[in-house]
Image: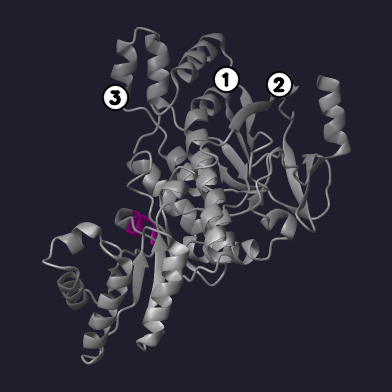
Amino acid sequence: MPTGLFTDLYELTMAHSYFRRGLNQTATFAYFVRAPVPNRRFLLFAGLDPLLTALQDFRFTEEDLAYLDSLGLFAQDFLDFLGKLRFTGEIWAMEEGEICFPGEPLLLLTAPRIEAQLVETLTLNILNYETLVASKAARILLAAGPEAVVVDFSPRRDHGQEAALHAARASFLAGFHATSNTLAGRLYGIPVAGTMAHSYVMSFPDELSAFRAFAEDHPRPVLLIDTYDPIQGARNAVRVAQELWAKGKEIVAVRLDSGDLTALSQEVRRILDEAGFPNIKIFVSGDLDEYRIREFRERGGVAWGYGVGTRLGVSWDVPALGGVYKLVEDEKGPRMKTSPGKISLPGKCQVWRQEGFQDLVALDEETGEGRPLLRRVMAGGERLTPELDLSRRREEVRQVLFALPPTLADLTPAEAPSYPVEYSPGLRHLVTARR
């Protein structure tokens, strides 16, 4: 889909002025997240692949240009220029799924100034939201533990259809096992999962009839047992399981979605075990996040898996990420914003990761120790890397997440977290000189 018009108006009015005054020299902008981010000891970078695709689709259609003309703000020669404009820039970025921190560049975009300016909104929209959700999903996984199955249940509460697709993608990248969003399953190759709704149970004369029908019609039935009385629901599930056993079929799991999930899960587990069905799993949902899952487990809750919806898709405790896109270099050299509380780092930089997630941000011409995190992924407006293998990368991200040092894996809210990010002598000198 053409993405040229997906921009804030002021990007266009600035671009119009740049065009009139011949200010279209090469410029570099950096995407980074301002510190601190409350309750976040780390972030998980996400959204790069969708951004590269969107930049390759960047153009203004005839309908776009007609609309801009109707605003009465732009000269015809500028509109003609936009009609031929494509993104021709270069991008250096961290790999998706990389553990990262506020205060360090996550992406550098170099292009003619007008191009770089016009794609700001698009860049921030995609990277901020996917990184926000991926970071939330990572924390939820840490709370659930490496053995638990975690499913994205968020689309009905996400802020729009596009957000739901990005949420499914970002949470899967972070290590989730599946999504309820079938369109995301088709688009991104994410496994899809679902159970049943209370409305299904209420559509039958009684709960037992509903369970029997669903178990007959579904190859791998998961029964929602809390439409009425969860304990009786568990007993009804046992009765259906007994009937299925005689036919060589099994119930996969029962789902709890309300009430005291901890106490109910313990009692339901007892009922299932005493009836001879230890293999029937318990799946819980209902306004879960990392805090509630951690409490559930600490109180002795029993669950094979978790469905996480609202608090994932809107990142309940941190509903927006303060990612920004700032000019760091142009034809005049390094550039720096010096506003109090909103300082940006000047110049093109590289991020060097040393052992133990200690990062050093250094100027391009400086040599750092460890692993360089920013890699060249686009040149001349064309991507240099293949489309991300989401399933492969997910496995790698899970391994990293469950091996994080305690200082990063700690889910305790941090009011003013400090991040393991340092600046090189050359960068610090340049910052001081520019102030």
Region rendered in magenta: 184-190
| Occupied quadrant, residue 190 | bottom left
Image marks 1 and 3: residues in contact by CB distance under 8 Å:
no
Label for residue 24? 1
Label 1 – label 2 distance at C-alpha: 20 Å
Q: Residue 150, can we see it?
A: no
Vertical side of 373 occupied by 273: above or below: below
Quarter where residue 366 is shown? top right
Q: Is residue 237 left or right of residue 418?
A: left
The label shown at residue 62 is 3
The amino acid type, in three-letter code, at marker 3 is: Glu
| Amino acid marked by disc 2 | Lys
Circle 3 — which element?
Answer: helix
Camera-side mark, 2 or 3: 2
Tag shown at residue 337: 2
Gap in Å between the C-alphas at discs 1 and 3? 23 Å
Amino acid on which the number 1 mark rests in the picture: Asn
Q: Earlier in the sequence, mark 2 or mark 3?
A: 3
Q: Secondary structure at mark 2?
A: loop
- Which mark lies nearer to you, 1 or 2? 2
**Pointer 2: residues within 10 angstroms few (<14), some, or many (20+)?**
some
**Near-viewer residue (212 or 1):** 212
As measured in the structure, the alpha-carbon distance from the residue carrying label 2 to the one carrying label 3 is 36 Å
